[in-house]
Amino acid sequence: MVDMTETREERVKKAKWYVVHTYSGYENKVKANIEKMVENRGKIDDIFEVIVPTEEYVESKSGTKKVKERKLFPGYVIVKMIINDESWYLVRNTRGVTGFVGPGSKPVPLTDKEVRALGVQEIVVSDIDLKIKDAIKVIAGPFESFIGTVESINAEKRKVKVYISMFGRETLVELDFDQIEKL
């Protein structure tokens, strides 16, 4: 049962990453099925993210190069979730899933080091209270310590375009939300 005193953000912080074994070739289908079942059964407070680890590579055929994508671990899907009877049952009984990785039927969470090694970035979402024409200070990156004025905000991509004064001229640069702070 979900503790109603906890916010979703607090539950996300408590969640751990687990590895789920699937039939080879069914990874994307399993990912889609888990996401659909989470939505349909209202388990968004127990299962937060499902990932099929992939990498890009360049394939050369008859002189042409193509960037393609391949699965890092065929037959495995990584799920960020809080383990309880309901969430375990939902994932375990998804079509294409053969079980969790761990002894017997007990899932073992990945360590933080293992999660980073897989290339899974923890997305830290911090809302920023900005408006166009606000003054900001750049706190990271090549323009660190510059002061600027907000020209446009793209909340979806978490980017902001800012005019900064460089060599006596106003220059438009694009920065991430986490590279700036409001003055």
Image (spheres, rainbow, N blue to C red):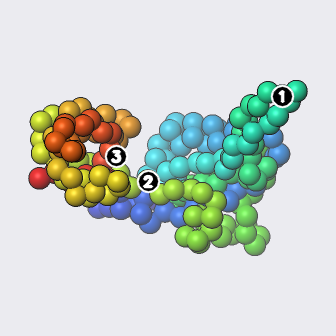
Q: CA distance from mark 2 to mark 1?
A: 39 Å
SS at badge 1: loop
- Relative placement, left or right, of 78 versus 72 is left
Residue 83: percent from left, percent from top: 55, 63
Residue closer to the observer: 51 or 69? 69
Q: CA distance from mark 3 to mark 2?
A: 13 Å
Residue 63 tag number: 1
Is residue 88 shown to the viewer in this render? no
Where 64 falls versus 80 (above or below)? Answer: above
Residue 108 placement: quadrant: bottom right
Q: Residue at x 29, y 52 (%)?
A: 143
Residue 56: percent from left, percent from top: 69, 43
Residue 123 tag number: 2
- Relative placement, left or right, of 21 versus 81 is right
Type of amino acid under label 2: Ile
Q: Residue at x 26, y 35 (%)?
A: 172
As drawn, the residue found furthest toward the right would be: 62
Residue 176 tag number: 3
- Going from N to C along the chain, the mark reached first, 3 or 2, is 2
